[in-house]
């Protein structure tokens, strides 16, 4: 049986949100299609930062009104667990 990697776990935690997840070393990039999903993520990010799971959020609005967030991952396991609680 193939072990489940952390990116797959993160995608599963975000399953109800239409988004693209990309990981580059310790930098994570998530692009949401819907404004309400982007607003949800931006609203919870500060709390996740206080809990030392993530840091340094940069947000951008791309083509087709997609919302992209680029940030550092400090603790992927903690980040996934926090998302699962939402």
Image (tube, rainbow, N blue to C red):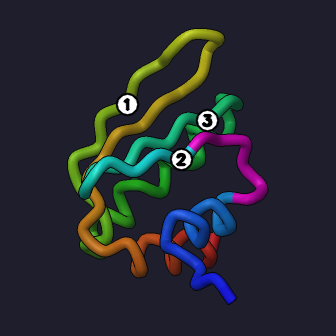
Q: Nearer the viewer, mark 2 or mark 1?
A: 2
- Indicate whether 82 appears above or below 61: below
Q: Which mark is residue 21?
A: 2
Q: Pick whichever of labels 3 and 1 is earlier in the sequence.
A: 3
- Indicate whether 19 appears above or below 12: above
Q: Residues within 10 Å of mark 1 (few under 14, many from 20)?
A: some
Task: Verify whether residue 17 appears in magenta.
Answer: yes
Q: Which residue is mark 1?
A: 59
Extent of the magenta region: 15-20
Q: Which residue is mark 3?
A: 32
Name the residue rendered at 27%, 68% in the picture. Answer: 50
Q: Position of residue 74 (x, y in %)?
A: 24, 68
Looking at the rendered structure, the secondary structure element under dot 2 is strand
Q: Quadrant of residue 3?
A: bottom right
Q: Is residue 42 left or right of residue 17?
A: left
Task: Verify whether residue 6 appears in magenta.
Answer: no
Closer-to-camera residue (69/2): 2
Looking at the rendered structure, the secondary structure element under dot 1 is strand
- Indicate whether 15 appears above or below 50: above
Name the residue rendered at 68%, 67% in the picture. Answer: 12
Q: Residues within 10 Å of mark 2 (few under 14, many from 20)?
A: some
Q: Pick whichever of labels 2 and 1 is earlier in the sequence.
A: 2
By secondary structure, the bulk of the magenta-drawn segment is best described as loop
């Amino acid at each position: 049986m193939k072990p489940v990697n952390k990116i797959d776990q993160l995608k599963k935690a975000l399953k109800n949100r239409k988004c693209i997840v990309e990981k580059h070393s310790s930098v994570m990039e998530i692009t949401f299609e819907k404004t309400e999903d982007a607003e949800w993520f931006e609203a919870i990010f500060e709390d996740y930062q206080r809990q030392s799971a993530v840091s340094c959020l940069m947000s951008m609005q791309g083509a087709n009104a997609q919302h992209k967030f680029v940030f550092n991952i400090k603790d992927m396991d903690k980040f996934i667990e926090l998302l699962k609680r939402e």
